[in-house]
Image (cartoon, grey):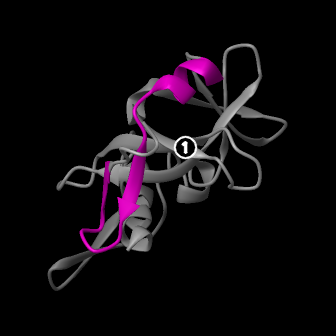
Amino acid sequence: MKTAALLSLSILLGTGGAYAQQVSAGRSELMSSVPQTSRTVTDWYKQNVYDPNDNKIGEIMDVLLEPNGQANTAIIGVGGFLGAGEKDVAVKFDSIKSTMKDNKPYLTLDTNKDALKSAPGFKYDSTKTTWVPDNNGK
């Protein structure tokens, strides 16, 4: 379920800037190299998110895609301890800024933990394979 979305995100993140040489194989486009601007899904998924003051404010729990494969929403888990009491909130994907820090992906969001905690909560509905409002999580 989430694996397909993450694979699509990996492809999406790798399509910017310079394009690699492509080799036709029937209807598929096979690549002989990977674009230099490519980013892996692991640079985003399950990564911590920090506020402008370097305080951890959450963790990327999921990335939602448009039908064309473009990332549009990130689900961020905020609060709680070891998953207990955690709340999942939605933010615009492009509001998360990615840089490198100590040779690792470093994600920041121009907000604070309290603002995320007060945002509407969402829960994953596995029967619909989508995120829905969590009326219990407000």
Q: Which residue is mark 1?
A: 87
Q: Label 1 neighbourhood size at 10 Å, few (<14), some (14-19), many (20+)?
A: many
- Residue at screen point 71% across, 34% down: 100
Q: In this picture, is 127 found above or below 85?
A: below
Q: Residue furthest front?
A: 136
**Residue 20 visible (yes or no):** no
SS state under label 1: strand
User: Residue 114, how many percent across, how many down?
Assistant: 61, 20
Looking at the rendered image, the quarter that the C terminus falls into is top left
Write down the quadrant of residue 6 in the picture: bottom left
Which of the 4 quarters of the picture holds residue 18? Answer: top left
Res 83 → quadrant: bottom right
From the image, which quarter does the N terminus lie in? bottom left
* Coordinates of residue 8 in the picture (x, y in percent): 35, 62
Q: Position of residue 59 (x, y in %)?
A: 63, 44
Q: Give me the residue at 38% from left, 47% from top.
A: 134
Comparing 95 with 87, the one in front is 87
Q: Residue at x 17, y 56 (%)?
A: 67
Where residue 63 appears, x then y in whole percent? 42, 51
- Foreground of the two, 138 or 126: 138
Residue 50 included in the magenta stretch of the image: no
As drawn, is 104 to the left or to the right of 122? right
Q: Is residue 100 above or below residue 68?
A: above
Please say whether residue 83 is visible from this viewpoint. Answer: yes
What's drawn in magenta, residue-wise?
A: 112-132
Q: Is residue 102 above or below residue 77?
A: above
Q: Amino acid at mark 1?
A: Lys
> What residue is drawn where x is 22% and y is 50%?
66
